């Protein structure tokens, strides 16, 4: 039975066959993007290593903004050396980075294929909700990734990479440490930025309400600070930069939960 048939007419084996083809298509697209990224080594690593430079675009933006109040303001230049300590570390880092960026680049297609797979089993109103939720998940994930790249990681790297307990002690950071910290922080921020989506599902299941979330604002703020302290490098500036947007997302979640409750009460029984 081919893929064009309705999902309700497919046998269990037919569903497995459709899923197998879907996984092969996803792997094929992700692999193609990963190969393209691997071949563009110079561009890829110039982009990934840019936050470690003292003239990174974020610093230029901040300088331009502060010069309105402090004419001639400039950040002090800094330099942190990146090293490779193992014979194969650069090559293996190149491969793993290409795979990571391949999956990230293929993520819109992955969402599209997953939606195609589950959509035959959904009602029309559920299908509309699914599209909106998928778009929201992707947009929030990308916002988390961009925030990490342009704000969190550059500031954290500058502080921790230049911090020294004595003049004779200099930091030399391994390439593995740099890339693993960058990718881990990026993925974690993309995940924690899904807070409004999680709140939406909890509200749909009747587990939370807007008054409940509003009542526990102080407790939630402490929990958000704890989560931010766990997922970020150990410096106060990064902790604040993560806590503030996450708490703003919590406030957005309160509005979303209230909207879900209102929409549910207004819908025909």
Image (cartoon, helix red, strand yellow):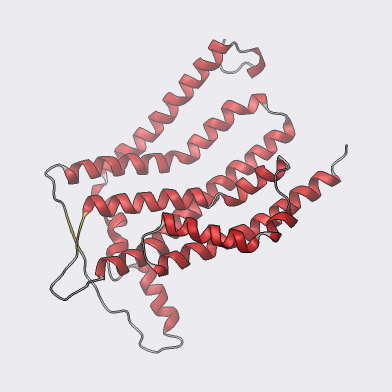
Residue occupying image coordinates x 51% and y 16%? 16
Residue occupying image coordinates x 74% and y 48%? 260
- On the image, the x and y values in percent for residue 111 come to 53, 36
Exactly how many numbered labels are in the figure?
0
Query: Can residue 43 be seen in the rendering of this structure?
Result: no
Residue occupying image coordinates x 51% and y 63%? 243
Determine whether 56 is above or below 186 in the image: below
Camera-side residue of 225 and 70: 225
Q: Is residue 39 left or right of residue 253?
A: left
Camera-side residue of 70 and 269: 269
Residue occupying image coordinates x 30% and y 37%? 35
Q: Is residue 196 left or right of residue 239?
A: right
Camera-side residue of 143 and 57: 143
- On the image, the x and y values in percent for residue 2 come to 56, 13
- On the image, the x and y values in percent for residue 69 come to 45, 88
Determine whether 266 is above or below 114 in the image: below
């Amino acid at each position: 039975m081919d893929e064009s048939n309705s999902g309700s007419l497919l046998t269990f084996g037919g569903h497995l066959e459709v899923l197998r083809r879907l996984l092969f298509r996803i792997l094929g697209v992700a692999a193609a993007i990963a190969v393209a990224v691997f071949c563009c080594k110079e561009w890829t690593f110039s982009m990934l290593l840019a936050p470690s430079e003292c003239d990174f675009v974020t610093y230029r933006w901040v300088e331009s903004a502060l010069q309105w109040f402090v004419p001639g303001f400039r950040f002090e230049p800094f330099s942190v050396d990146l090293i490779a300590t193992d014979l194969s570390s650069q090559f293996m880092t190149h491969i793993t980075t290409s795979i990571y960026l391949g999956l990230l680049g293929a993520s819109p297609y992955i969402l599209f294929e997953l939606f195609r797979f589950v959509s035959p089993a959904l009602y029309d109103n559920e299908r509309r909700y699914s599209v909106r939720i998928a778009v929201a998940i992707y947009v929030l994930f990308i916002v988390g990734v961009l925030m990490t790249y342009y704000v969190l990681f550059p500031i954290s790297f500058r502080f921790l990479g230049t911090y020294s307990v004595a003049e004779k002690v200099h930091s030399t950071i391994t390439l593995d440490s740099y890339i693993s910290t960058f990718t881990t922080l990026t993925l974690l921020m993309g995940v924690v930025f899904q807070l409004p989506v999680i709140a939406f599902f909890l509200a749909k299941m009747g587990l939370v309400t807007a008054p409940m979330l509003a009542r526990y604002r102080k407790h939630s703020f402490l929990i958000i600070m704890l989560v931010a302290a766990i997922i970020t490098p150990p410096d106060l500036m990064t902790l604040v930069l993560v806590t503030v947007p996450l708490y703003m997302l919590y406030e957005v979640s309160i509005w979303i939960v209230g909207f879900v409750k209102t929409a549910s009460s207004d819908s025909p029984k």
